[in-house]
Image: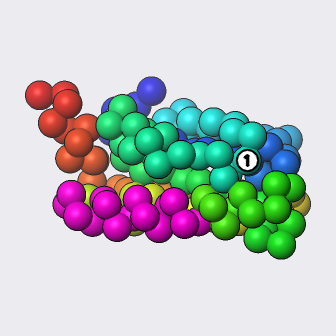
Amino acid sequence: MNNLEPRVVVFSCPWCCFQTADLAVAAQLDYSPNVTINIVPCSGRVEIIDLMRAFENGADGVLVLGCLEDKCHHQNGSLTAKKRVGYIKSLLKDIGLDEKRLEMYMLSPSTGPKLEEIIAGMITEIKKLGLSPIKEKSQT
């Protein structure tokens, strides 16, 4: 893993978004080795503590990928995740981290190239922001 590249942790729904990730891999879309994709039963199952621990464990940015709101296999999972992400964004701001370090996207299974754009966009944004101050403190 390259320590000069931002570390991005992804929490991905298996119903829509992981299929998207599979399509991206099949199409040989390039992902940084600093991107970790975690499959969760539903984006709505990503708890507040999971998001905060990702930052605590050295993530410079975190993405939550869920189904389209009206296509969620668990009815309200994407909406639940969206609320949690919004809450954590406000907490990040309160503790001095830029809220752009956490994003959520709702995707359909056929958007492989868009997934690559989302991940690349997150990496670009994190490079502008710099490494996470939490990460820097833990390395000293």
Q: Residue under circle 1?
A: 42
In the rendered image, which quarter contains the N terminus? top left
Q: What's the magenta bit mostly, secondary-structure-wise?
A: helix
Q: Residue at x 86, y 66 (%)?
A: 71
Pick the front one: 106 or 128: 106
Q: Residue furthest left?
A: 140
Q: Residue at x 53, y 46 (%)?
A: 47
Q: x, y percentage for residue 113? A: 76, 60
Q: x, y percentage for residue 39? A: 70, 37
Q: Which amino acid does the dot numbered 1 rest on?
A: Cys
Q: Is residue 129 visible?
A: no
Q: Is residue 122 visible?
A: yes
Quarter holding residue 76? bottom right
Pick the front one: 11 or 36: 11
Q: How many marks?
A: 1
Q: x, y percentage for residue 70? A: 83, 72
Residue 86 falls left or right of residue 44: left
Quarter holding residue 74? bottom right
Q: Is residue 3 magenta?
A: no
Numbered range of the magenta stretch: 82-96
Residue 63 falls left or right of residue 38: left
In the rendered image, which quarter contains the C terminus? top left
Q: Residue furthest bottom?
A: 70
Q: Is residue 86 magenta?
A: yes
